[in-house]
């Protein structure tokens, strides 16, 4: 038995992470543009008590040419649509921070936290392409350094805005006609290189206080706080292609690569569910974001066979111990920086 408890999550993008997934998946291509498709895979992850699912997004079409899935639904709106009919799984959309107002990011993610009853997170990602900048026409694409600096400012500001309402700001005093205590709403007064935000938010403080913020740190890590700070947890993405035998797994890969030659970014695994469990147990990160090569095939095998193997090794819980994403991830209560100010 091992003492460390892994955090496990799954990407539920399109027909799977491999560009040719839509050509072999049982999922009808038209289903990719329905909320029901993402609900089915979120519920599959939820049945295995995974911490959260992610849904990618961008202001650009998917790269790769005419033989890949092109077009996407808005990730945050899609997860908001399925939030009321899920019960335990965390919901983490990607939100592009470049060209997007931080105030809107803050209120939208806070709304997802209300819709999910405290299970929201957000993966903030900048945009670097001229094509995406041309959709807005307000400014050119930033340099990588400026994009990273702006992304950090966005993380700072959305947290300030979530805190701009104290937890007990809503008083609902019918006798005096006061719905809120205005002394418990706060200006954030942020002035930076890229934007300024006055505040307070128009949305009350989210159920979690701070929905969990994620940001990429290099090609391999996703950090829960968006920065390398004490208490941050590293979640490593890993693309998985599974089958009952090693030979069958490599044959699946051959078929997919014949349809569209592809080398996944970051870490990848091809093999059996049990061998994947052994590999995950030998890692030095806090957890993994599983990117199934094909949906639902690889997510189904992962939840049906890899997850039980990890439980048998004492590395993953058997059920949800809490109700919020912060509780799933073992994060403490989010203190309000303005409380009592």
Image: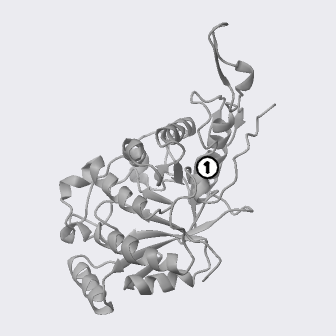
- Above or below: residue 229 compared with residue 276: above
Q: Residue 326 location, x and y as percent?
A: 61, 53
Viewer-side residue, 284 vs 310: 310
- Above or below: residue 314 compared with residue 230: below
Viewer-side residue, 145 vs 246: 246
Quadrant of the rendered structure where residue 28 is?
bottom left
Q: Residue 99 location, x and y as percent?
A: 49, 43
Q: Quadrant of the C terminus?
A: top right
- The crowd level at tag 1 (other Cα within 10 Å; few <14, some 14-19, many 20+) is many
Q: Which residue corresponds to mark 1?
A: 150
Query: Could you tell me which secondary element the residue under label 1 belongs to?
Result: helix
Viewer-side residue, 288 vs 84: 84
Q: What residue is rendered at 73% in x and 44% in y?
A: 335
- Above or below: residue 20 compared with residue 97: below
Q: Residue 25 location, x and y as percent?
A: 22, 68
State the residue lying farthest toward the right: 341
Q: Quadrant of the N terminus?
A: bottom right
């Amino acid at each position: 038995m091992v003492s460390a408890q892994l955090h496990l999550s799954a990407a539920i993008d399109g027909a799977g992470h491999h560009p040719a997934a839509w050509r072999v998946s049982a999922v009808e291509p038209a289903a990719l543009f329905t909320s029901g498709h993402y609900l089915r895979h979120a519920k599959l992850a939820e049945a295995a008590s995974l911490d959260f699912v992610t849904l990618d997004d961008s202001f650009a079409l998917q790269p790769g040419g005419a033989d890949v899935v092109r077009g996407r639904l808005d990730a945050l709106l899609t997860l908001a649509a399925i939030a009321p009919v899920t019960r335990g799984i965390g919901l983490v959309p990607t939100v592009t921070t470049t060209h997007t107002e931080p105030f809107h990011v803050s209120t939208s993610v806070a709304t997802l936290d209300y819709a999910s009853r405290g299970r929201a997170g957000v993966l903030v990602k900048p945009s670097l392409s001229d094509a995406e900048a041309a959709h807005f026409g307000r400014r050119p694409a930033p340099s990588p350094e400026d994009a990273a600096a702006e992304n950090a400012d966005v993380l700072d500001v959305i947290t300030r805005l979530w805190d701009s309402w104290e937890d007990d700001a809503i008083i609902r005093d019918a006798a005096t006609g006061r719905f809120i205590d205005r002394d418990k709403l706060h200006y954030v007064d942020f002035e930076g290189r890229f934007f300024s935000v006055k505040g307070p938010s128009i949305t009350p403080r989210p159920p979690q206080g701070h929905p969990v913020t994620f940001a990429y740190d290099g090609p391999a890590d996703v950090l829960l706080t968006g920065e390398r700070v004490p208490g941050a947890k590293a979640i490593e993405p890993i693309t998985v292609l599974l089958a009952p035998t090693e030979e069958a797994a490599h044959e699946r890969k051959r078929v997919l690569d014949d349809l569209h030659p592809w080398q996944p970014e970051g870490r990848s695994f091809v093999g059996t569910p049990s061998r994947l469990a052994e590999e995950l147990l030998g890692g030095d990160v806090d957890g993994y974001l599983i990117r199934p090569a094909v949906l639902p095939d690889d997510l189904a095998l992962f939840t049906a066979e890899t997850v039980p193997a990890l439980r048998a090794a004492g590395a993953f819980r058997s059920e949800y111990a809490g109700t919020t994403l912060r509780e799933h991830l073992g994060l403490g209560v989010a203190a309000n920086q303005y409380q009592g100010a």
